[in-house]
Amino acid sequence: MAGVFSTLLLSGMLLCGVLLHIVSHHAGTSTKKPNFIIILADDIGWGDLDVNLPEERANNNTPHLNLMAQQGMRFTDFHSAASTCSPSRAALLTGRYGLRNGVTHNFAVDSVAGLPLSEVTLPQLLQKAGYYTAMIGKWHLGHTGPYSPTNRGFDYYLGIPYSNDMGCTDRPGFNLPECLPCNSPGPQVIRLQRDVHGGCYSKVGLPLIENSSIVAQPLDLWTLTERYKSAALRIIHNARDQGQPYLLYIALAHMHVPLSPLVAPDTPSTSQNTDDGRVYAATLQEMDSLVGAVKSASDSDTLIWFTGDNGPWEQKCQFAGSVGPFQGKWQISRGGGSAKRTTWEGGHRVPTLAYWPGRIPANTTSTALLSGMDILPTLLSLAGVTPPSDRRYDGIDATDILLHGEQTGHEFLFHPNSGAAGKFGDLQTVRNGKYKAFYMTGAAEACGGATGSQQLHDPPLIFDLERDEAEERPLDFEKPEYKAVADRIARRREELLWDIATDTSVSTADYTTDKSAAPCCDPTQAVCRCHLLR
Ligand SMILES: *[C@@H]1O[C@H](CO)[C@@H](O)[C@H](O)[C@H]1NC(C)=O
Ligand SMILES: *[C@@H]1O[C@H](CO)[C@@H](O)[C@H](O)[C@H]1NC(C)=O
């Protein structure tokens, strides 16, 4: 009896195996989950990518990204979830507006906390689903204890825990105003250095962190690209050897000042052939070649998503990127800058590409209205992971847009104030179709220092981005077109604000600062100087 039973069982198992084999063969995919690489550029402008510009204006600074666009999908209406670093990154990793995840403005070198621990991150969810999760680069969501990347879902971390200007380096790089080097001999010299509002922050040297240890301080910025590149390639190769699906999140230091590229003599200039324009161009090329190296190393079943954290930092003049056609002219004519930190298009419309050979159709353009918050639901959906049901998400699953030519993105998308006007995180600008409404306007500091003033708008200013991508002339309040749009947007805005007000999963971030929270490998040394530990 037992013999017959086990024979039956065995043949049953064989049959199952055959069926499974047929099924998976038929679907054309293995049961292994796809790999994900997110590459987030810092302060990159929409017009920094050649493929986003008309041919006659392109400089050929981004050949690898151009090729990625040709082999994948380019997005023309993709937005960072905020117009400044920490909130944009928090929203990307949580799929939620800053009003829900608590991160509405930037953390500092001496911030004691970070992204609230009540928030659930993309790497946490993928890690639980069997992914190897690694991060390289700028975290900027809290660097102390439980707030650090390896405690928020990453198995491995290598990077500068915040912006590359938040600490001095021995070779300062290109910035405006010039950052002072940290090779100053004694503490009193350091005290004389200008703080946040000067060049680089000067209290501590810029640290390089691996997992949760400082491995270099101050970091030699000029070696950073090579370090990031070799770490990325090692992670990809190791994950392949292990046969484990992976998430690799690379938050580049490029194109944030101070820039530190090697400038070849034949580098073309991005602005009127000046040397500074050549520095910017060389930095773009360096970023592009890093992306190219990651792309060539990646396996075929890997989705690479390239995007930006916010628009260019105009205050940095020739060391800032290009907004392309999104010039925010209404604001510029009233003074101040209209890119990073603002809710003008130049502040949050970011160059974005998605590449996945054999899955994302090649050489395609998507005009769907999308946001960095959509990355979390989309990757979870592709990995077959259900997001936790105890919280509300603002991002949408864009799988059908990536894979199946669907063009419908957000019906409404809100842009939070990132420091240009009013209260941090407030949803002051709303997109609906081709229309964009401003309940409040404000400017960032422009090149040259002009700041402009904040202004409330009741009724809101509404621009038609299809006719007026430079946001120059708002619609006439008297037009029936205006009234219909204004009503629709006002209704949806009320609904969302109510939804957030009644959301029991809203988190609050602790923005307290304390000197002791600044990363320091040796407090007895000026600028916390240490030898390279590894
Ligand atoms: C970081 O963690 C990895 C394991 O994920 C380990 O191989 C490496 O040695 C660690 N590095 C440091 C500096 O602790
Ligand atoms: C990509 O598409 C454009 C226009 O849609 C076409 O002109 C070009 O030849 C295509 N390139 C490739 C490599 O297929």
Image: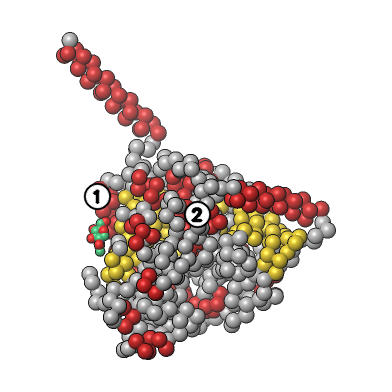
Which mark identifies residue 241?
Answer: 1
Mark positioned earlier in the residue sequence (1 or 2): 1
User: In x, y percent, where is residue 148?
Assistant: 36, 61
Crowd rating for badge 2 (residues with CA inside 10 Å; few <14, some 14–19, many 20+): some
SS category of the residue bearing label 2: loop
x, y percentage for residue 295? 37, 57
Checking the image for residue 112, the label placed there is: none
User: Which quadrant, please, contains the C terminus?
Assistant: bottom left
| Quadrant in which residue 169 is drawn | bottom left
Q: Residue at horizontal 60%, vertical 67%?
A: 342
Residue 337: image x %, image y %? 61, 74
Q: Is residue 384 above or below residue 497?
A: above
| 1 or 2: mark nearer the eye | 2
**Residue at the (56%, 43%) spot, across then down:** 406
The image quadrant where one finds the N terminus is: top left
507 relative to 265 in the view: left or right: right
Q: Secondary structure at mark 1?
A: helix
**Tags 1 and 2 in contact by the CB under 8 Å rule?**
no
Figure quadrant of residue 77: bottom right
In the shown orientation, is residue 487 left or right of residue 144?
A: right
Q: Which residue is mark 2?
A: 507
Along the viewing direction, whichever of 248 and 237 lies nearer the viewer? 248
Q: Does the closest atom of ligand 1 sit within 8 Å of the Cβ of label 1? A: no
The x, y position of residue 56, in whole percent, is 57, 68
Q: Could you tell me how far apart the alpha carbons at marks 1 and 2 are, in whole angstroms?
A: 39 Å
Three-letter amino acid code of the residue under disc 2: Ser
- What residue occupies the far right of the structure in this picture? 478
Q: Residue at x 37, y 29 (%)?
A: 23
The residue most toward the left is: 3
Q: Amino acid at mark 1?
A: Asp
State the residue in front, 434 or 210. 210
